[in-house]
Image (spheres, rainbow, N blue to C red):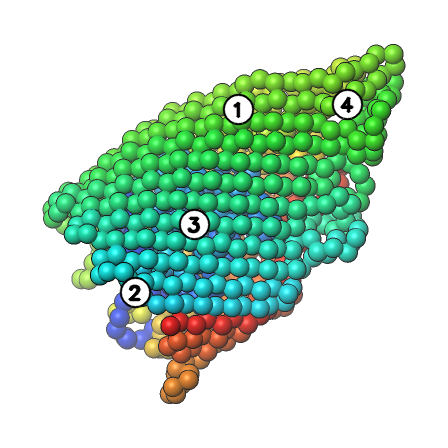
Amino acid sequence: MHPFRHILLWLALLGPCAAAASGRGGEIDTLVTVEDVRITVRSLKEARTPIDSPVAVSHFGREEAERQRIATLRDLSALVPNLHVPDYGSRMTSSVYVRGLGARIDQPVLGLLVDDIPVMNKDAYDFDVTDILGIEVLRGPQSTLYGRNTMGGVMRIRTRSPLDGEGVRAGVEYGNGNTLRARASGYFRATPRFGIGAAGYYTASDGFFRNAYDGSPCDRERSGGGSLKLQGRFGRTEIRNTLRFSRTDQGGYPYASVRTGLIACNDPCAYERTSLTEGLTVRHDGGRIALESVTSYQYLDDRMTLDQDFRPESYFTLVQDRREHALTQEFVLRSSGPGRYRWLVGAFGFYKRMRMQAPVTFGEQGIRELIVDNVRDHTGYAPVFYHDEFPLESDFENPVCGAALYHESSLELGRWQLTAGLRVEHERARLDYRSSTLYPCRIQQNEIAPFAIDGRLKRRFTEWMPRFSVLVHAGRTRMNTLYLSAAKGFKAGGFNTQMFSDVLQNVLMEKMGAAFDRGYDPDRVVGYDPEESWNYELGGHLHLAKGDLQIDWALFWIDCRNQQLTVFPEGRTTGRMMTNAGRTRSLGGELSATARPWPRLTLQAAYGYTRAEFRRFRSGDDDFSGKRVPYAPEHTLSARVRYEIPVRGRLLERIVPSVDLQAVGPIRWNEANTLVQPLYQLTGLSVRFEQRHYALDLWCRNLTGTRYDTFYFLSVGEEFVQRGRPRTFGVALQLDF
């Protein structure tokens, strides 16, 4: 069946049911949840309830997260309108696209906070979270309150507190691909005012793709981690300390050749990561004023070994060793007393330091085709290399620091709510680099000894980020709201460290007499500028049928300057780099609905449409103006039907069958829009058996075995794709004591 027919079928099912919503009492949460998470997910910066917030927001409560098996950021892809988090087959990096904004590498477009602690490195977004209490996804620029790299939105995750309840939880899951997941947690109160919580998890999988070169699994995984939470409430003061750690060991990227359809790498591919986060939150309610301090230390240590040509021939391999330390500190002061006027002021500072070694080693075929043939084509002479391998060493040190001051004021005038905010942020970034060759070579009678290039690059950014909004309450219950907002977004600039092997290769060929017209300048090639945007949004939150039908909608218009794009260098080379497009425009809309036409039936749907296109973008001789922005899907759709069947028994209380659909696409893979992933749909089924102390879940994703791609790129002149996951299924058991 055509994907659009699946979509129409689901909408046809949802529409009559939603229209038949009855008058059963009780309030339900916004968008895609049926639980109340308004208090558990809210931080001091967001003291208002979502119904009072002039922003598009999606909510997932504890029960909803468990029933939909949400444990990572990727699990939310398409469930949230206009949110796309592709599965690249490795946790090495996390790409997030929101409303046409996003990039595969470097700076994120969506901020992530776990228990109020910001995750500073986008590459570390892909991790498992245990004991989720609530999730909020705010879309649109949140830069006024949250600063850099939140121009697409913010995701806030809240985990279970030891002061909210004691008990022990354990779970185990097994699925195809020999996938095993286990988790356990315990929460205890030492005193009525002090509690301790601990959680751990382990995942092992043989993966779903094989390397045709040697038959080994491509996407195997072994990972584990845990957390320790200490929390105390002493009068009006609350102190929370959270320690999180994780360890990941998995295969490299399972990229398949478009020409052969095979994943075939002759060199080993693997990825290892160790991460640790320590966060301390202190909150004091002084009656009329509330104060919050959030302090964090974050450590990241990862190592990647990659056959970077992704072919069975010996072109080149990459080894990347990276260590990163980050410190953050934030103070928030907010009015909390009665009155129509409310205000908030805050200060935020961070320091991050990354050190990385990234040697690239050219193999026999890489030396011959990428260096020797290029030099011969330009000079008529073939250089001679004395070894079968030619390594290029690169060492980097990248310290970044920043500070910000921000303020927000809100005034209520009857049913009207006026809000204005401003953030001033300053950031400094530096890159110290040294790239060198290790072996000599010769062209004619000229000996080229090992050499090095080194230097220092600097970037400074100062940005003003205002936000304005108007919200009005409608109806007797004031539960229906309409809002209009305008906000500026900001995404920091940075450095293309991935390009230094290419820079060094070109310097080498210049020494051989093969000078290129493009004349590599490290500052021009390696550095890229910040991205700025203005977002204009009109939306509303509706509660109808006594709360049994809730609708959230938004229309947006985004003007963006210097949008950061991940591109691949032309010709027979490899790697990826960040560049800036001149101007882009993104416009679209979002619609989410949750309906309970009958007490046991829940219908959910979320749809997003984005038209993101270049308004002004030239690359070389190519003019891409009017073309769609690559990697950002045009449509995202999720729909779900769930029915609860009560069972009167001691061993079983209810059976909860559900059917869901997700659809994404089309996705343009290149700036010229000549390569496209058509819209595809994934269907899922689950049957959940629930009792007070346990839940047994039988589930299946991609039931129809839909074939689709999540990524496309060029390497050494050949096309590669990341295949989407095939049909997956399993059984999960959860125990609560």
Q: Which mark is residue 165?
A: 2
* Percent coordinates x, y for residue 24 in the rendering: 28, 75
Q: On the rendered structure, is 493 left or right of 525?
A: left
Which numbered disc flags the more N-terminal residue, 3 or 1?
A: 3
Residue for badge 3: 244
Label 3 is placed on what type of residue?
A: Arg
Residue closer to the observer: 176 or 232: 232
Residue closer to the observer: 162 or 138: 162
Cα distance between the residues tagged 2 and 1: 48 Å
Residue for badge 4: 439
Q: Tell me whether circle 3 and circle 4 mark residues in contact (CB < 8 Å).
A: no
SS at mark 3? strand
Which numbered disc flags the more N-terminal residue, 2 or 3?
A: 2
Q: Tell me whether circle 3 and circle 1 mark residues in contact (CB < 8 Å).
A: no
Residue closer to the observer: 248 or 465: 248
SS at mark 2? loop
Which numbered disc flags the more N-terminal residue, 2 or 1?
A: 2
Quarter in which the N terminus is drawn: bottom right
Cα distance between the residues tagged 3 and 4: 43 Å
Task: Bin the neighbour count of mark 4 within 10 Å (Cα to Cα): few under 14, some 14-19, many 20 and up.
Answer: some
Label 1 is placed on what type of residue?
A: Leu
